[in-house]
Amino acid sequence: MADLSINLAGIKSPNPFWVASAPPANTAYQCHRAFEAGWGGVVWKTIGDPIVNVSSRYSSLDLFGQRMVGFNNIELISDRSIETNFREIKECKDRWPNHAVIASLMTDTRENWHDMMKRSLDSGADGVELNFGCPHGMCERGMGSAVGQNPDVIETIVGWVMEVAQIPVIVKLTPNITSVAHAARAAKRAGADAISLINTINSITQVDLDRMCPEPYVEGMSTHGGYCGPAVKPIALNMLHECAADPEVGLPISGIGGISNWKDAAEFIALGSTSVQVCTAIMHYGFRIVEDMIDGLNDFLDRKGMASVNDLRGLAVKSVNKWEVLNLNYKRIASIDYDKCIGCNLCFVACEDGAHQAIALTKPEDLKVGLGPGRLPGKPIPEIKEAECVGCNLCSIVCPVDQCITMVDVETDKPEMSWRDYQEKLSKGEMEPIPAHP
Amino acid sequence: MNLKPRVTAEQAAENLAEIEPKYTPQEAKVEADRCLYCFDAPCIMACPTGIDIPGFIKKIANHNLTGSARTILESNVLGASCARVCPTSVLCEGACVMLDRDKQPIKIGRLQRYAVDHVMDNDIQVLKPAAKKLGKKVALVGGGPASLGCAAELARLGYDATIYEKKPEAGGLNTYGIAYYKLTPEVSLKEVELVKSLGVEIKTGVEVGKDVTMEDLLASHDAVFLGIGLGHTYRLDVPGEDLPEVFEALEFIEEIHTKPLDQVAVGARVVVIGCGNTAIDAVTQAKRLGADDAKIVYRRGENDMPAYSYEYDIAKKDGCSFLFHALPVEILGQGHVTGIRLARTEPDGKGGVKVVAGSEFDLPCDMVIKALGQEKQVNLLNKLLPGLELDRSGKIVCDPATMQTNLPKVFTGGDAINGGREVVNAVADGKKAARGIHRALAGETVEGPVQATRLGAIGKPTGSGFDKPVRVPELEQAFFGA
């Protein structure tokens, strides 16, 4: 059993799994249920002047028979009073002293930020998270992503907060920005203790073609919603890496964005997260999902011989680099296992129309692979044209059978050479330009 | 004497190969992803051992196979054999909500097998013996599923459990008495090893009442669990029954499990009497071992058979034939079986059948297998424990909550109390008895799902779970009324 406990900028938690600031973290009741199920921390639903919500509020992207591959919402911050929220935070902390309870805050003036920080401290919260991310509603009022999209404003507001902060301050960043690292650096400059990302992405999930109006439907109208769920994970991982690898940021990170199971969590941790936050998967299945997150992560760490989850943190950060340092002389090509091929020919059409015309259709008798599933006499089957294959991965990605098309390394007998090396060699006249592809 | 081996080793291996092979990783993933991960799922309620089914399936979907197997084995230590032999269509899969949506339940049995095989094939230890021993001893009589389920739970609670089994191997019918194509003895023996790895001692080749007395067991242990199952097949009581080619079904199946398959002798024309699940196991295996004709003779009709419909389907697919509304009046032959004399039956109007006068006819055959159900072990029990309370049919009477008999130190479960049900019922009984023993000896109550509501997908009772729901009385009430 590995040690799953973490310490994010002074916020301690028995495991890295936190409930994200969202509907599942709205009340003390939910917080108790979350901790009973095994969650290590809760970031409270954002506290501010109580708002008024609309009905309806959520919409989903369903794909291929699965619900909630992507999910969006137009709900605002807490609709409960500031007093109620802080009273319940105190109640939670009293009952769960060893778990992390973090107050998510959103307000406007310097005075109000100071007041919210004082109330957070008084409530016993382990830290605060400044919500600079909400991309709907609150941004129209100069808060949420309106703050997070302007590094100068981030720096100013974090500066106000840090004037009075006595507990760790996490700044939650919006992905609706050109470069998230600039926002993270601003938070760092102003003295923030940590960052969390990503908040939700501006989105419209679908249009009802009878009403000619998107969901969520609010009497003939809709609005841009915040997008989250499994579909946003790649975007979140990318932004996480941008911040984790940026020497000017250098802050502990709480990763958020489409995390649904232990494997997603492990990927976020490997790319630099200390804790991970989850919302959509809880909204789909309930707090109980954390049991397998803990169990699966533990099993993974045991298998890898890691005694602590902290040993995993950041292990993959260095492997992501600029394109210009990738080795131009590394080569891999596709290889088909004919014992597994079912003869769908998706690889052929994908390569022929969508990529590099490096797969031929050949009669099985000519390939000498015998007949079998998908291999009828005279019915052509795919054959990799090895000389043409650029190793793009497309065929192995579209192949519906696990381990049927694999990518294998090919010895090129050429020394390692990146684009940067290539440019240098060219400028020194050490080599001729590589001929353009015909 | 026309009994002889009729297939080569290769043919036998092919004919008796598993009918449902293990899922490939991709098959398992696709099937696991179909599971909705219901909350308070009906499949759990339909499982006598209360396995967290959506939980273990979610773990398969999430690439946590070890955790998945742990979830299964913590609830049911015989999860590998139950995955193969459970009548899932009337238990978990019969309760699956997907029946109502897609008409196709999640293949829970096959997914369970996939997960448990992962830890068994890779020797991954997922269950751990108790950290602290209680210094109390329990003897278990019989080494079948009930005792194994009980001993595993006792060991995990900290007891020193010793199983006494008269046969050379433990596992009971799992090792000796289930159709080869569903469960091989190897899987059963691996499960026995798993139970041993928890610290349970298994003394095989030791018969209680002969090699060791019940008095000694009672004197030297704090409690005794009776997992003695059932005895011999009921007799036909017809002339010719003692001819050498007349077998009990379990005797025939045990031979398949203890001899090389190409040395198991079968007749050319085999008649199996009875139409329960064991009869199906016998007739299909006789056919698969080379009998030209393997026929079931049953005194009632097609719709009355106790065998599950999917078992009936297997036999029909195997080319076995069925003769309904007939019963044996004599087994024919001088020194060897040459045929069987049958009589037609008709309903007697009182729920039974009666012989149609003058309807007798002869059927040539050279092997007769009796599968009429097993007798209760009344004589044995009277001898071992003269004060033990039995009901009128000879089943041991016990408190359904604790499995305690009228003798305070004696607990029981499995076929000996239910007259012959599924492996999973025996494991569940054993687990419940272990908790009953723990309550009696240590005064502690162990919580956990060990019951079933028997609610099917459309709210009709299905399956062979316990008699009374514990977990969701509201649901039961909703479906069955107050």
Image (spheres, grey):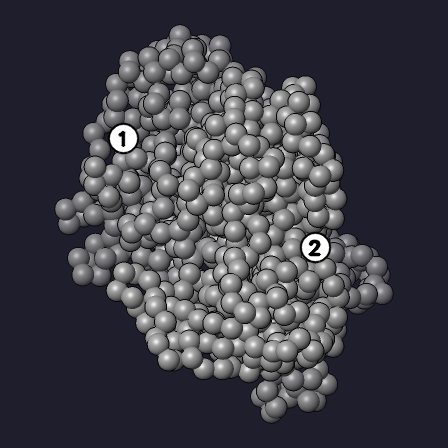
- Taking depth in this image into account, of B316 and B362 the one nearest to the observer is B362
Q: Position of residue B307 (x, y in %)?
A: 44, 62
Q: Are marks 1 and 2 in contact (CB under 8 Å)?
A: no
Classify B374 as above or below A348. above
Q: Amino acid at mark 2?
A: Glu
The answer to which quarter of the image holds residue B7 is bottom right
Classify A10 as above or below B249. above
Residue identified by numbered label 2: B186
The answer to which quarter of the image holds residue B143 is top right
- Taking depth in this image into account, of B283 and A71 the one nearest to the observer is B283
Classify A69 as above or below A407. above
- Secondary structure of the residue carrying tag 1 is helix
Residue beneath the point at 42% across and 76% down: B343
**Label placed on residue B412:** none
Q: Position of residue A437 (x, y in %)?
A: 67, 74
Quarter of the image with the N terminus of chain B in it: bottom right
The answer to which quarter of the image holds residue A319 is top right
Q: Position of residue A165 (x, y in %)?
A: 47, 12
Residue identified by numbered label 1: A141
How many numbered marks, from 0 up? 2
Q: Amino acid at mark 1?
A: Arg
Residue beneath the point at 40% across and 7% down: A122
Quarter of the image with the C terminus of chain B in it: top left
